[in-house]
Image (tube, rainbow, N blue to C red):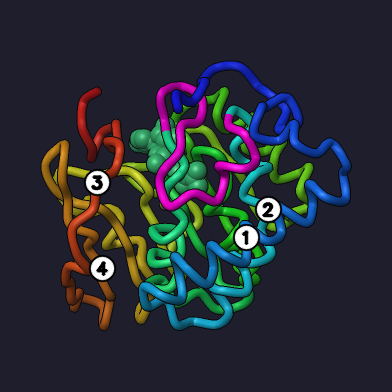
Amino acid sequence: MRLRVGRRAHADDSPADSASNNPAERAARTERARSEMVAGQLRRRGIRDERVLEAMATTPREQFVPNVPASLAYDDRALPIDAGQTISQPYMVGRMTELLRVKPGGRVLEIGTGSGYQAAVLARLGAKVTSIERLPDLAETARAALREVGIEGVDVRVGDGSVGEPEGAPWDGIVVTAAAPAVPDALREQLAEGARLVIPVGPRFQQDLVVVERRGPNDWQEWSDGAVVFVPLVGEAGWSD
Ligand code: SAM
């Protein structure tokens, strides 16, 4: 099935949802899809942090993908959003969130707001999130989705996040949801001691999910959590387009 991009369709428009227009039945189907996603995609593949599982069990992903039928929102894959960008696969959102080890009240920087879904999950964990998006239209749509879902504690800004946000540093966690050619030095420097940076790093079409942990003023340990594929981080410390 080809997914339409570029038009804000309502979930109820779609053939997949026309089987029942009863709001209660639609809500029950969505609820079921969300629980199945948590059990079949997250828990089964090794996401163990119960707080992350709970946050993803209570965040309505369908509200962040208005261009696709609600019945596909919980599929095991990345989905298109506007401007040729994507919302990451649920497992990837869960894994990156788990690796960050977010604490309630922790100040987290997200680079690449996209749909706003990852930011919503972080906020559900009690983080105070600053999220930077380079495309103003996407930032605006994400703000609207976050508002609609009733998520507070996310500050969406427009700019080049490849150099981080020095103003708010040090951060208790930094997550980059687009792929960089190398770990930007500015992001290492903006980590608090004990905090982690989670970032896809490598060539355009396949990267490693790199975790950088700051263990002291001049001590950063880093390792790969495995192979991933992300859209490019475009900016001063990223790719040129
Ligand atoms: N976290 C998002 C979500 O939950 O939907 C998915 C993000 S999408 C995979 C990557 C996003 O990074 C795109 O929206 C893209 O415009 C954005 N991006 C790319 N380079 C950027 C940069 N230098 N600064 C901020 N955002 C950037």
Where disc 3 sits, the SS reads loop
Tell me the number on the disc at residue 34. 1
The residue type indicated by label 3 comes to Val
Apparent side of residue 217 relative to residue 196 in the rendered image (left or right)? left
**Considering only order in the chain, which callout, 3 or 4, is on the residue closer to the N terminus?**
4
Q: Nearer the viewer, mark 2 or mark 1?
A: 1
Give the SS element for disc 4.
strand
Residue lying at 21% horizontally and 25% vertically, measured from the top left: 240
> Given contact means CB atoms under 8 Å apart, are the residues at marks 2 and 1 in contact?
yes
In this view, 161 is above or below 57: above
Label 2: which secondary element: loop
Residue sitting nearer the eye, 166 or 20:
20
The residue indicated by pointer 3 is: 229
Q: Give the quadrant of the C terminus.
A: top left
Magenta region: which residues? 68-85
Q: Which residue is mark 2?
A: 60
**C-alpha gap between disc 3 and disc 1:** 24 Å
Left or right side of 235 for 93 = right
Image quarter for ligand 1 equals top left
> Does label 1 or label 4 sit earlier along the sequence?
1
Q: Residues within 10 Å of mark 4 (few under 14, many from 20)?
A: many
Hey, what amino acid is under mark 4? Val
The residue at label 4 has a CB less than 8 Å from ligand 1: no
Residue at 64% in and 44% down: 62
The Cα atoms of the two marked residues, 1 and 4, are separated by 28 Å
